[in-house]
Amino acid sequence: MTQVWSDDDRLIPVTVIEAGPCVVSQVRTIERDGYEAVQLAFGDVKESRVNKPETGHFAKAGVTPRRFVAEVPIAEGESFKPGQEVTVDGFEAGQHVHVTGTSKGKGFAGVMKRHNFKGGPGGHGSHAHRVPGSVGQASTPSRIFKGVRMPGRMGGDTVTVRNIEIVRVDAEQHLLLVKGAVPGGKDSLLTIRLA
């Protein structure tokens, strides 16, 4: 993240995203696959890290192997060809996008951190400072219901932040500057689509 000045002299917090160039590695059609989608490939990869099926898949599209592959649905009226390059030129400053990524994993967390529980009394003989408190009933139903918020692994989930404004587009360096924060840490993979 960084910050940029707007035209009306306001400081805007932005996240800089390297968006592409992606190449079309496969086009799904209703006749052959039963649905319409396009498979996009992104990122450099060493030749030694690519197995034979992947090498053949990329060779069929006429592109060099890439590290990440993702399938996205096609909107009506759009058409793609294998080997076609998709760049940030499809975005403009002022548009709103949905950004999907994997949130940072926090490991095993208690209920106060994971679910924002208040916690128990701080002193005066209390032994329940950060515990969840009562979670069930007595002999009826003699169990804890599904969905009760408990300690456990926090983060590492697929998160979508909706309606983020694009502040700037740098087509030469394939960069998107979007307003605010996006899910995940540095160098994590994101999916960006128009709102």
Image (cartoon, rainbow, N blue to C red):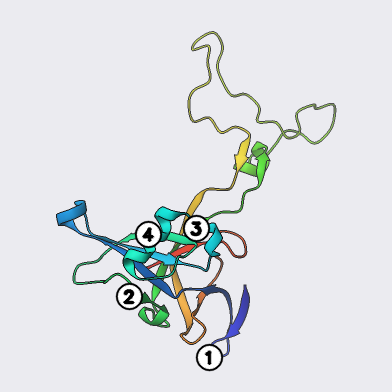
| Residue under numbered circle 4 | 56
Between discs 3 and 1, the one toward the N terminus: 1
- Crowding at dot 3, Cα within 10 Å, few <14 / some 14-19 / many 20+, comes out as some
Tell me which corner region of the image, top left, top right, bottom left or bottom right, holds residue 182: bottom right
Between discs 1 and 4, the one toward the N terminus: 1
Residue 192 coordinates in the image, percent (x, y): 42, 67
SS assignment at label 1: loop
Side of 92 relative to 73 (left or right): right
Q: Which disc is residue 84 wearing? A: 2
Side of 82 relative to 111 (left or right): left
| Residue under numbered circle 1 | 8
Residues tagged 4 and 2 counted as in contact (Cβ below 8 A): no
Residue 190 coordinates in the image, percent (x, y): 49, 63
**Residue at the location (33% across, 72% down)?**
83
Q: Please name whichever residue, 65 or 178, is drawn nearer the observer in this view of the structure.
A: 65
Give the vertical position of 35 relative to 63 (above or below): above
Q: Please name whichever residue, 163 or 21, is drawn nearer the observer in this view of the structure.
A: 21
Residue 151 coordinates in the image, percent (x, y): 63, 34
Q: CA distance from mark 3 to mark 4?
A: 10 Å
- Crowding at dot 1, Cα within 10 Å, few <14 / some 14-19 / many 20+, comes out as few
Residue 133 coordinates in the image, percent (x, y): 66, 27
Q: Nearer the viewer, mark 1 or mark 4?
A: 4
Q: Please name whichever residue, 77 or 152, is drawn nearer the observer in this view of the structure.
A: 77
Task: Give the amino acid at mark 1.
Answer: Asp
SS assignment at label 4: helix
Between discs 4 and 2, the one toward the N terminus: 4
**Residue at the location (33% across, 61% down)?**
72
